[in-house]
Amino acid sequence: MRGRSRGRGLSCALVAALAAMALGACGQERGTEGTQGASTEATGDGHTAPTPAAAQRTIEITPDMVTAGQALFVRCQGCHGENGGGKQGIGPHLNSATFLAAASDEFLFNTIRNGREGTTMIPWGASMSDHEIKQVIAYVRSWSDAPAAELNEGPLHGDADAGEEIFGAICAGCHGRTGAGYQETANGTGIGRHAFLSTATNGYLRYIAKNGKSNTRMRGFANGDEIAVANLTDEQIENVIAYMRREAW
Ligand code: HEC
Ligand code: HEC
């Protein structure tokens, strides 16, 4: 009896340790720390209130930074394509005008620095300095001169239960039933993951859901957009984002 229970105790400890490793508990902690450090570094403050367009661009870009960033982008193009044109099922487009209008420097910086845990987008902060990451962002920014979009960063007021139906009927087809992205379909990215949703602001999500990601199959779902595969009202977009946030994994 004693031997058995000791044995069980030991294996429990082992299982717990393995589970913690499998869940990447340590990595996640480091990622969170990195995010906080980076947001202070990238923005100089770290506020979350409604963001005026100017506050989304905090990295000062010089021609030298663009040139240096272009050389660094060699590390990225295997997945993101030459000139950021994307590779279906491998790496998303980075040279999309609506994407670059909606993505703040902070979002780009944190995504590149911390990666997206659970995907092939590794934390590049392990092998690139903050300055190098800013150089690569300068190069990525050179693909579009679209100004920063006005983002509505107000709190979400959606109904997650109502959003579930919309997600299942519309978004799941390209992003996967749980938003696993490339791991389930070859189309959209992993929009259900905590690693993505903790970096993407409400304003970014609202903007992309409404306006789509130009240059990709992600169309705008805003009501009245004739090319949209399905039109959604603002309220329905709130609902679907509320659902994504509630289910983040
Ligand atoms: C091994 C493949 C791979 C490499 C190399 C890679 N990425 Fe990624 N990247 C991905 C994938 C996959 C995603 C999307 C993951 C998801 O959320 O499903 C991504 C997402 C991103 C995003 C967010 C895009 C969006 O639509 O929100 C940015 C920005 C980015 N990568 C920049 C870079 C930069 C800069 C480099 C080089 C330093 C790089 N990546 C190297 C695979 C890669
Ligand atoms: C027809 C396929 C399709 C449908 C339907 C679709 N998406 Fe997408 N979505 C995509 C593609 C493709 C991308 C961008 C991939 C790339 O850049 O190559 C994307 C990107 C996104 C992004 C940006 C993700 C990131 O990594 O930055 C968000 C947010 C998003 N979609 C939300 C939604 C929501 C919400 C719905 C449902 C209302 C939806 N999508 C329906 C194909 C689709």
Image (cartoon, helix red, strand yellow):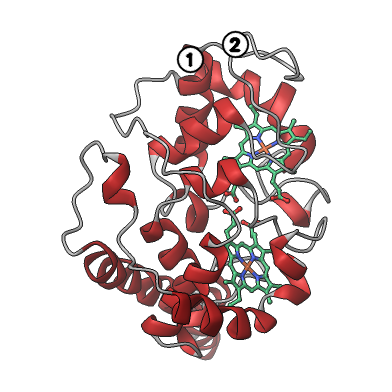
Indicate which disc residue 118 carries.
Answer: none
Q: Name the residue at 64% across, 26% down.
A: 220
Q: Quadrant of residue 69?
A: bottom right
Q: Nearer the viewer, residue 92 or 56?
A: 56
What amino acid type should be assigned to the residue bearing mark 1? Asp
Say if mark 1 contacts mark 2, CB within 8 Å.
Answer: yes
The quarter of the picture showing ligand 1? bottom right
- In this view of the protein, which residue sits in the foreground, 111 or 16? 111
Residue 79 in the figure: left or right of residue 213: right
Q: How many marks?
A: 2
Residue lying at 24% horizontally and 71% vertically, measured from the top left: 41
Secondary structure under tag 1 reads: helix
Above or below for 193 versus 117:
above
**Is residue 187 depicted above or below 79 in this figure?**
above
Label whose residue precedes the other's in the sequence (1 or 2): 2
Instruction: Give the residue drawn at x 48%, y 15%.
Output: 234
Tell me the residue that label 1 is attached to. 234
Q: Residues within 10 Å of mark 2 (few under 14, many from 20)?
A: some
Q: Which mark is residue 223?
A: 2
Q: Where does residue 168 sit, x and y in percent of width and height?
A: 70, 26
Q: Is 218 drawn above or below residue 84 in the view shown?
A: above
Instruction: Give me the C-alpha separation between circle 1 and circle 2.
Output: 8 Å
Q: Can residue 8 be seen here?
A: no
Q: Comparing marks 1 and 2, which lies closer to the viewer?
A: 2
Return the residue found at the far front. Answer: 63
